[in-house]
Amino acid sequence: MKAKPITIYAIDGTKLNRSIPKSKKKWTTNDLILLAMAMLSVIFLAIFAYAPLYGLVLAFKAGDGYLNIMNAINQAPFVGLANFRDFLADPDFKNIMFNTLGLNILQLLINFPAPIIFAILMSELLSDRFKKTVQTVTFFPHFISWVIFGGIFLSLLDFETGIVNNLFMDLGLIKQPLDILGGEQYFFGLIITTSIIKGVGWGSVIYVAAISGIPQELYEAAKIDGANRFQRIMHITIPSIAPTIVLFFILSIAGILNNGIEHLWVFQNANNIMRSEVLDTFIYKYGIPQWRYSYATAIGMLKSVISLALLIVSNAVLKKVTGKGIY
Amino acid sequence: MNKFKRIMTAITVLFFMSILVACGGTNVPIDDDNMAIIKYPDFPLTGNDKNSWEYLDGQENITINWYVDVASWNPPTGLDIISGIIKDKTGIQVIFDTPVTDDGQKLATMIAGGDLPDVISIPTNRSQTITSLAQQGYVYDINTLAERWAPSLMNHLPTDVLEWWSYGNGKTYGIPNHYYSYEDIPEGQLQPNGGMMVREDIFNAWQSYVEQNLKDANGMVTYTGLRGGQKQVPWQGYITTPEGFKQAAVWALQNYGSSLTTGLQLSQFRANGSASLEWLSQFFAIPFEDEQGNYVYQFTQQAYADMLYYLNDLYLAGVISPANFTQDYDGVGSVIASGKAFATLVTPQDYQIHFTTAKDGGYTYRSMYITNENGDAPVLSDIRGYGYMFNMITTDAKRPDLIIKLFDFLTSKEGQRLISMGPEGVTWNWTNGIDSEIVYTNTYLQEKANSQTSKYGLLQFDLLINWQYYDNVQPKTNHGKTEAELFRTNLKRPLSIYAYDYNAMAFVVDATDPRFQTYNNNLTRIETTIGTQLPKIIRASSRAQAESIYQSTITAIEARGLSMVIEMNSAAFLKAKEKLGITTAWPPYQANYVNPLNRLQPNGDLSKYRGY
Amino acid sequence: MNPRIQFQLPSRTHVYRLLKLITIMMLMSTIFLLYTSNIEIDEGDTSLYHTLDALSWISIALFMIVLIPTVWLGVRLYQQRKAETKHIRKSKLNKQITLFDVINTSLMTIFMVLCIYPLIYVLAGSFNQGADYTAGGVYFLPRLFTFENYKVVLTNQGLWQGYVVTISRTVIGTLTALIFTSIVAYAMSRPNLKYKKVFYWINIFTMFFGGGLIPYFLIIRSIGLYNHFLVYIIPALYSVYNMIIFSSFFRSISDELHEAALMDGANEFRIYWQIYLPLSKPVLATVALWLAIGHWNAYFDTMIYTHSPNLQTLQYFLLKAIQTATLTEGMPAEMMLRLSPKTLSLAAIIISMIPVLFFFPFVRKNFQSGIMIGSLKG
């Protein structure tokens, strides 16, 4: 790259015709060291993020049924967009997309604000000790894996022996036990509720820390001015933690189509499959055990494309609203 | 961005990708009949003068990995006596592995990962997997292995079994277990595979209720049919009619409500439905063949729909519990074990421990049958068949010559006796020479009474077992059997009079057909769709709703390629009949069929109980 | 330095704290003994019950003995403290308890119960005899007490194998990933990195677009990581997300330190290793926590990328225990009737949670400060 020459002015401000070529910076040892350090990421990503992109070629081949993936890539014939067309024509397509997008949007709408609200509520607690206890206890479920947590909830929500149904019936809230684990209509709610219980304590820590940084005087001043609790929250608390909120909103959009297969896998069963089949579980179920490698890769690729599109759209919206985006 | 840098990045990435493309992926040649051409290793051949494993001099000592693709299969520990004897005879120590779930994922990743175990055992209903493994050169064919290194295997393995599983090129790629060769099956009818059980105490109470209140002067009960109209049946058999059973179940729930949670317990509802529906369709004699000998797809038949509506009727009457649809194996088992079901349609042998527990707890279950509303006799499938698990030796195995000898030993009668009964002379002896009956030793009987027999590992290494042979050599008395074992073996015997050869339905679709991949994809989706909709039909809030869900299911499966599935099934069905040498498979259409229906014996023919 | 060791009398507060601890312990053991001596114990005979009875009486006595001085000391200390701080008035805003507070506190309490109850449920079930449990209804306390479930689980080879694998991967994986990621992050945080934008884009792009499960599997296999322990470590070495967190923290460290070190003749790597890394303890702790939890709870990679039993993680073992009857394998039939896979898996869950419970308090302390710093710099 040719360096731009530096223009020279005389002492009175007039431009001279000569110019001094800008010397190209020499590379120091430190520059090389830094370069090497950063190259580590390139090597890693080349292997684990970019090389797999080559496997995407499977999506355009008829590789279903080959037991050996490499053979599928090398030997199967090209079929262009046939796999994508198959998926779009798949009778379950509408259902899967509805479930995937629906679950994601719900999670964005509910699971994103939940830790914020929780943190605000916690900060309004009167006793510090109680607040610390709440934090510790709600913090705990995050550390347990979905295998365990899900397994426990499968027991708790059991149709006959689960405590939830028995409790509700004893309290007279319901007459018949609710088929929470099997009923399609309950699935979304089940996922949202369990993920809130598991994640809200953990997710709120950041907001709690941010809120604790807000000086008390602001609140006292507002109280003197006659602001009630709600107004205090809206006009002091939220604007103060707004940068944190925006940061995490951006980060959560980045993972938008990832439903958390480990979570869903626990609760998916033959009864609620119409509502519980999302892209990830579908790819997993039909990709590997059925050896439909091409089909699964095509769907996975479709998922990435939609994800990317959503990301671009939300970034544009974000830029319009807040002036800042991911890029 | 610096052009130079861009190029460098692209080159780096491409460099890596090319490396990866280069390594991996072997090109296995395919020959004309669409099967892979396998390369065999070069071990010295074995002769045919004695059993193949007897040629071993005890110098060989290897350990093999044996993967069994069934999550619930319990492997032997390897420390038991039987495993020790196997190691002595064949020099092979076996390490078993099983998956966590039954979805085939672990096997698929092992294959994709290029790291296969030495032996794989897969349930025979996963025909696509088995065929793909054979076609793409992942497993050896038994014929060649036996020819080279275990010629005596051909004397030990029944020919009809070997041929049933052969492909177009005449080769068989594995050996099944639980097969019932026509060479071994005795005369007469076998036990059925499925069965209906009912709690004896409540059953007796109901029968006396019918006798006292519903019977008329001629000993008949008059009742209203499902479609209206009056019908008559001998009073003992009233419970075996659909209408009668419903009334009995409702009565049972009313009068025994404290000890019952359900009138009719069905088995677990899995992704592709519940086994109970298969058994009920056999009790309701829904044909799989028409009078011209063509294949009939059962789900779309009106008779099948009527069966579903009957189940819906039972559900609405409270006979089938809503909990049934979310229970897993343990859930169903605990209902049975605590005697909380009036009647069950589960596969009895799958829950035999639970039925035994129930008996110990005071709730004895007995067999019974039920007919469709037309009064056709049940047509149950008997226990015969050509196999439950299919065992294959992979081409990754380093010593297939030794493994085939292991297969030979396990298939031979000597091996069968070892696995099922223990070492000769230690736990049992012949009464009258080889293949007469056996008698158990006193040591064994004592150890059995003290529950100390687990050291032997009996019946655990059952991957190549031939049940009929084992049954044939058993003493024909209750010698060596505990009461619980007798109870278990007799669970379904009275229903034997309704059990027939269903082998034609175990047809294997030709995997070398180019449409096989699509066929399998369609079949999977259809089965999943039916599996999802079945609970909905049964739990519909009204008959009209059940009908509409049923109709929409038919539309859905037709959209998923049902016609192709039926077409390929028909071809396979006709071929199976050819292999079996019959023209009519559906028993009631066969020339020598005699209607065995006996309403006076609602539990089946009790004289079929065996004392052994 | 004074060679003579000063002997200090423990202060009253210390004594009080110690006494309080002992009292609470005595109280708990009393409750435990009273409970166990009065419920049905599986296979308990009369001598066992007699022993428990005796022990519980002894425990009550001890509890009383310790209680009296504790209370007395506690009251004295309270009075002392009150006297000292009488003149300091803490200004509190109007501490009126409004309806909002009541609702808020109740909601929080309910939520806490939701979070902690699963633990109680599992504990109760794990101490309950198997066959009895399947009849249902064990919600808070075991109905038929037994240690049998724990005995079976603790003697299971697979459990310990899972522990070894999971602990190894957590320790090794976290350390290596921390170092690897922070090295890259440091480089990315330096303004004088050549081709910075190129690196940035190479990283960011991977957050948006991926190959999916199957091509990724192919790569794992091609490199030879399939069914190898390193498949848990190497693919987890780097994450763009963590790199961004590190680099934004590094950027916040004042450049003067950097300049000074350069003048002393240090190269960039030494600066990173000896100056920046020690300064980023809070962020290190936070990211280490994320990584450690990820490793600890992982099972999906075991399912897909391995098949050898030696490489099973703890969570995968638990998955098998919960979904199949793994834990009752090889048992004689009589034992099978007594045990239930459900209670066995609950016991396995408790055992696998013990390390988590143990590290939990440490984690809490460090986490607060780390996140605060991380978020404010975000």
Image: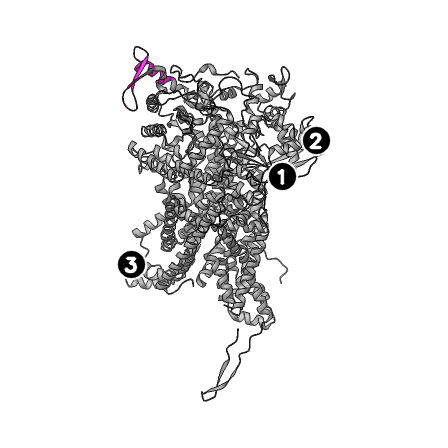
Rendered image: mark on residue C125? none
Residue B485 is covered by the magenta coloring: no
- Kindly indicate the quadrant of the structure image that contains residue B235: top left
- Residue where numbered disc 3 is placed: A228
Question: Rounded to the nearest whole Å, what is the CA distance between mark 3 and mark 2?
Answer: 92 Å
The chain to which mark 2 is attached is B
Counting from the top left corner in percent of width and height, residue B268 is at 43, 32
* Above or below, comparing residue A85 to residue B71 in the picture: below
Judging depth in this view, the residue of A103 and B192 nearest the camera is B192
Is C146 placed left or right of A208 in the picture? right
What's under tag 3, amino acid-wise?
Answer: Asn
Counting from the top left corner in percent of width and height, residue C175 is at 56, 55
Q: Secondary structure at mark 1?
A: loop
What's under tag 2, amino acid-wise?
Answer: Leu
Rendered image: mark on residue B397? 1
* Cβ atoms under marks 3 and 1 closer than 8 Å: no
Kindly report which numbered mark, 3 or 2, lies closer to the viewer in this rendering.
Answer: 2
Judging depth in this view, the residue of C65 and C125 nearest the camera is C125
Is C143 placed left or right of B106 in the picture? left
Whichever of labels 1 and 2 marks the residue nearer the N terminus, that label is 2
- Residue where numbered disc 2 is placed: B56
Residue B207 is covered by the magenta coloring: yes
Residue B270 visible from this viewpoint = no
Residue C134 visible from this viewpoint = yes
Question: Rounded to the nearest whole Å, what is the CA distance between mark 3 and mark 1?
Answer: 77 Å
Say few, some or many: other residues with alpha carbon within 10 Å of mark 2 (under 14 / 14 to 19 / 20 or more): some
